[in-house]
Amino acid sequence: MRKFLLGIGIVWAALAFMPLASADPTAGHDAKVRIQTPPMLCEIGSDDADPGIGPNVVCQGAFPQSPMDPIPSPGWKGDPATLHQDQAVVTASGQFSYRDANIGVGYNHPPFDTLVPGQTYHIQGWTIAAGDGGITFTNDDTGHGMTVGSDQSVKPF
């Protein structure tokens, strides 16, 4: 009986002091990934020191329902798709927005992982379920997130 209790105590201690692999709490730390369905680049952050919005996911793509910025002039003949804001942003607290920006890739960084349909991933405190119909990002602590459909429609939750 003592050996059994000692074994349970050792296992409990090992689990209690084991480092968490699901998130890096360092402000500004993120992981950049390529998404196959829909094709886009996303940045998954455990925290964002600037502008201080906390854990978040930013995906860059062509989102047809995002606002146009700038609004085209009367008589403009260009492709309106080029004017839609190109990033969908969701925070762990459930705040959602679109914005125009670029995910920074012009510096030394680890190679991007590619998230493939049919797999579930755990990155920076987020669970990511990739499927043929799109991809869902869910914050592990709050349950907030967003789904980006294969048609690039975005549904925050």
Image (cartoon, rainbow, N blue to C red):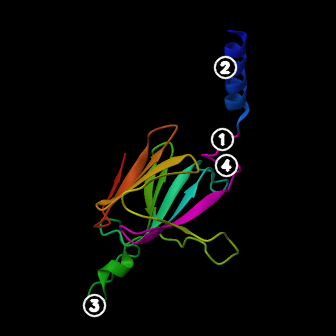
Distance in Å between CA atoms under marks 3 and 4: 47 Å
Query: Is label 4 or label 1 in front?
Result: 1
Q: Position of residue 20 (x, y in %)?
A: 66, 41
Distance in Å between CA atoms under marks 3 and 2: 71 Å
Q: Is residue 156 above or below residue 1?
A: below
Q: Nearer the viewer, residue 68 or 135?
A: 135
Tell me where residue 12 sits by quadrant.
top right
Query: Is label 3 or label 2 in front?
Result: 2
Using the image, tell me which numbered label, if any, was put on residue 20.
1
Residue occupied by mark 4: 24
How many numbered marks, from 0 up? Answer: 4
Query: Mark 4 belongs to which amino acid?
Result: Asp
Crowd rating for badge 4 (residues with CA inside 10 Å; few <14, some 14–19, many 20+)? some
Q: Which residues are magenta?
A: 19-41
Residue occupied by mark 2: 8
Tag 4's secondary structure?
loop
Residue at position x 32%, y 66% from top? 152
Query: Mark 1 belongs to which amino acid?
Result: Leu
Q: Nearer the viewer, residue 112 or 53?
A: 112
Q: Nearer the viewer, residue 156 or 113?
A: 113
Distance in Å between CA atoms under marks 1 and 2: 20 Å
Residue occupied by mark 3: 77
Query: Mark 3 belongs to which amino acid?
Result: Lys
Residue 82: say if magenta.
no
Query: Is label 2 or label 4 in front?
Result: 2
Query: Mark 2 belongs to which amino acid?
Result: Ile
Q: Are marks 4 and 1 in contact (CB under 8 Å)?
A: no
Tag 3's secondary structure?
loop
Q: Are marks 3 and 4 in contact (CB under 8 Å)?
A: no
Q: Are marks 3 and 2 in contact (CB under 8 Å)?
A: no
